[in-house]
Amino acid sequence: MWSVALLPAVAYAANDKAPHFHQGKLAPYEIGPPSLMLSSDDETELRAGNPIMQTVVADDSCTRRLIMVRDIEAPAQVVMGRILDIKNYPRMVQGVDRVRNYLEASNPDGTQEVRSVYDIHVLHFKLRYFMKHVYDPAQRCLVFHLDYERQSDLDDSVGYWFLMPQGRSTTRVFYSCDTKLRGWFPAPVYNLLGKAALKQATTWVHGESLKEWALVQQKHSAEGAPKRFFRRMQEAWDDAQTAKPLPEFRVPSLNDWLEKRRAAGPGARRSSPPSQPVGTGSERAVSGRQPPLLFTRMPRPLSRCQREGARGGAWAARAAACAPPPLCS
């Protein structure tokens, strides 16, 4: 029986001065929520704290990939903070020896880009590869693939993180990764970089997120009430900024309804303001800052002298003296 320890080391060597052998063989992941349906049994497993593994179809509609799903008892910002802490992967992720970020940039579309070089070991094999990460804060999604401008020991690699808040302090994590090696490697290496790597990824994120959340709670418990109040207000504001805006809607104008009431006369049947917009002039878009409503003064009820004015004489003179002013236009 052969031993992996006796296998020769891989002859390939990464080169940051030369481009990769191709521009991508594996279909990259797209930013956005996964196309995944969870059954009631899956939901039961997730609520019990157990991860589940599902098969999804890639964006090319041909490739099938594995995706891990797990619920973590920590806010989404804490979980994503652990995932984005790439330079500390050697401390958090088993098998990662060294990581160095060589480019960090913000793109015009609001996404953030980080390029890193990884040194890892799998059994007795040492590999180096260059990875490009793209993070979308609005969608809480991170996708990555090889930096094809530099030559890596891996043939190709693509991956995906997506976070779905399940409450103020619970997050559902979706993770998927697909890796292709160059040359011959024993089956245990493929297993460690495949299904085993999927399970390990959600495991280390779960453990590190719980530790970080415990430290955050400990720090917050030492705060005074005013500071804690303003911190929570700031967190709510940050959540509102990253949330998707509500669709624009329109409401009827109260001024137009009052004009129609006056034009109909006192004998018109009373009705409430319309619930739907009526015509172009009775609408106003509710988006951003709204102009103030202009309210029209309603007519006052008739006084006794006005009601008796029809009798003539002194009552008519008094009725003319206390007549109400005309309605403003």
Image: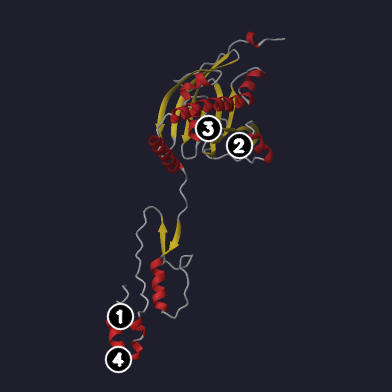
Q: Quick one: 295 or 17, which is closer to the camera?
A: 295
Gap in Å between the C-alphas at discs 2 and 1? Answer: 79 Å
Gap in Å between the C-alphas at discs 3 and 1? Answer: 69 Å
Q: Earlier in the sequence, mark 1 or mark 4?
A: 4
| Type of the residue with mark 4 | Gly
Name the mark nearer the viewer: 1 or 4.
4
Q: Which colouring convention does the figure follow? A: secondary structure
Name the mark nearer the viewer: 3 or 1.
1
Gap in Å between the C-alphas at discs 1 and 4? Answer: 16 Å
Read off the residue under disc 2: 58
Q: Earlier in the sequence, mark 4 or mark 2?
A: 2
Read off the residue under disc 3: 74
Packing grade of label 4 (10 A; few <14, some 14-19, many >=20) is few
| Type of the residue with mark 2 | Ala
Gap in Å between the C-alphas at discs 4 and 2? Answer: 93 Å
The percent coordinates of residue 122 (x first, y second) are 59, 17
Packing grade of label 1 (10 A; few <14, some 14-19, many >=20) is few
Q: Which mark is residue 15?
A: none
Q: Earlier in the sequence, mark 2 or mark 3?
A: 2
Read off the residue under disc 4: 313
Name the mark nearer the viewer: 3 or 4.
4
Packing grade of label 3 (10 A; few <14, some 14-19, many >=20) is many
Name the mark nearer the viewer: 4 or 2.
4
Mark yes or no: residue 147 visible.
Answer: no
Question: CB atoms at circles 2 and 1 under 8 Å apart?
Answer: no
Name the mark nearer the viewer: 2 or 3.
3
Q: Residue furthest top?
A: 6
Packing grade of label 2 (10 A; few <14, some 14-19, many >=20) is some
| Type of the residue with mark 3 | Ala
Q: Earlier in the sequence, mark 2 or mark 1?
A: 2
Residue 59 sits in which quadrant?
top right
Read off the residue under disc 1: 323
